[in-house]
Amino acid sequence: MRKSLKVGLWSVAGIVSVVVLLGIFAKTAVLAYLSPPEMFDISQAPKAPDYQDSYFWVSHPDKDDSADLIPPETDLSQDYPEPPVDVFFIHSTGYVGPGGWNSTMSEDNSEAQSIEYMLSSMASIYNGCCRIYAPHYREAHLQAFLSDALSPASQALDLAYTDIKQAFDYFLTHFNHGRPFIIVSHSQGTAHALRLLEQEIDTQPIQQKLVAAYVLGYWLPLDKFTRSFRSLTLCQTALQTGCIISYDTYGAGGTSEGRVPHWYTSGWEFNLDESGNNKASACVNPLSWQTGQEKVAKTQHLGAMPVEFKRTPIDMLLARNPGFKFSQLPPISPQLTWAQCQADGRLEVAQQHDNAFSNHLDQANHSYHVLDFSLFYANLRQNALQRTQAYLQQHP
């Protein structure tokens, strides 16, 4: 059976590296050690987060965290000294085991280093327009996206979503106080963000406060806009507000075969059609902010920002946080790539070679999953400011 080829790609690569080091005969033992139990047992789930406790906000305006960092020589002339908008950021998968189906959220575990990477390379994009709030949550194990069956993976995802829902409610009541907001997510975070958009925002009064939703890296099926969302649509221009931006990045000639679970009102489903093929997915080109399949030249690429991933394969195997904290970001690299949405929904870019954005995993599908944000860092930063300004003009 086909499995997802990109979700948690950095985690898979690390595990594979460990397996290679230990030898082929150790493969079964290593994977068994890292894998969750065969069945999901809610009685064994980690204790739920308490969002009154600042520990359970990995990014918060009152904290000094990596989401506050800005690449050197960034043009700050359009930034807001007092940000008028809030970001609710839902991070990707970092938890690869060993342990149960959901993360314990311990700062000592290796996924804490992954979150540090996500804050610096993803969430920091939005600090020019927005106050950033990112909840710690009992994220589902990577195996939830590699399983042949929807259960027990869906039970782990449901548990993770209960935390996201609780965090969002707390955010609205205690932090946001009716301000405009942006939803930002990646990979597993996007699985939960899409459910949150459908259940809590779409057609609700709060939808009027939504500036935009940047929900990347999770093959958003187009049928979500007919089966799930009743009023939310894909963004078609750089200044449109209240809409959704989504794309999945691949090098030239890449393929998007694989599957991931999506939540619908009827329950969890894989992103496959009746014939077992991948459904067409949404693609908003971050160089044009349009959904068409025109190739946009690299002259429109404002810049990528490479952030080095500090978690090693041994850290993953030992469930150990190396404890690295980013104190600065590297400079922006402009005009690095063109971009073009494909018929199947892939965002195709120039295949990178011998630079900080090279696909060191050398995957046959040319996935740049871990670079969905950082490869278009400057374009995303500028656009968040543009949509914020447009929203404020529309809602004085």
Image: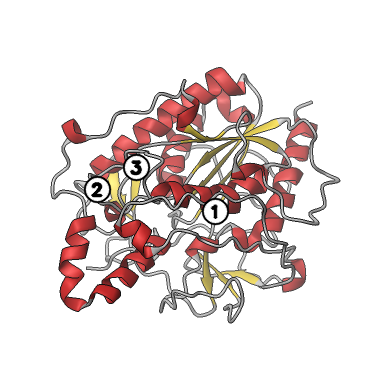
Q: Which residue is mark 1?
A: 246
Q: Nearer the viewer, residue 319 or 395?
A: 319
Q: Is residue 257 positioned above or below 162 on the image?
A: below
Position of 369 with respect to 388 (left or right) is left
Q: Closer to the N terminus: mark 2 or mark 1?
A: 2
Q: Which amino acid, by three-letter code, is at mark 1? A: Ser
Q: Residue at x 40, y 49 (%)?
A: 111
**In which quadrant is the N terminus drawn?**
bottom left
Q: Is residue 190 positioned above or below 86 on the image?
A: below
Mark 3 to mark 1 CA distance (whole Å): 18 Å
Q: Position of residue 47 (x, y in %)?
A: 29, 29
Q: Closer to the N terminus: mark 3 or mark 1?
A: 1
Residue 205 is tagged as none
Q: Residue at x 35, y 50 (%)?
A: 95
Q: Residue at x 67, y 73 (%)?
A: 338
Res 99 seen here: yes
Q: Position of residue 200 (x, y in %)?
A: 46, 29
Q: Position of residue 161 (x, y in %)?
A: 36, 36
Q: Residue at x 77, y 71 (%)?
A: 299
Q: Position of residue 345 (x, y in %)?
A: 50, 64
Mark 3 to mark 2 CA distance (whole Å): 15 Å
Position of 41 with respect to 191 (left or right) is left
Q: Nearer the viewer, residue 349 or 267?
A: 349
Mark 2 to mark 1 CA distance (whole Å): 24 Å
**In which quadrant is the C terminus drawn?**
top right
Q: Which amino acid, by three-letter code, is at mark 2? A: Ala
From the viewer's perspective, is the residue at label 3 or at label 1 nearer? 1
Q: Which residue is mark 2?
A: 153
Q: Quadrant of residue 194?
A: top left
Q: Which residue is mark 3?
A: 264
Q: Quadrant of residue 133?
A: top right
Label 2 residue SS: helix
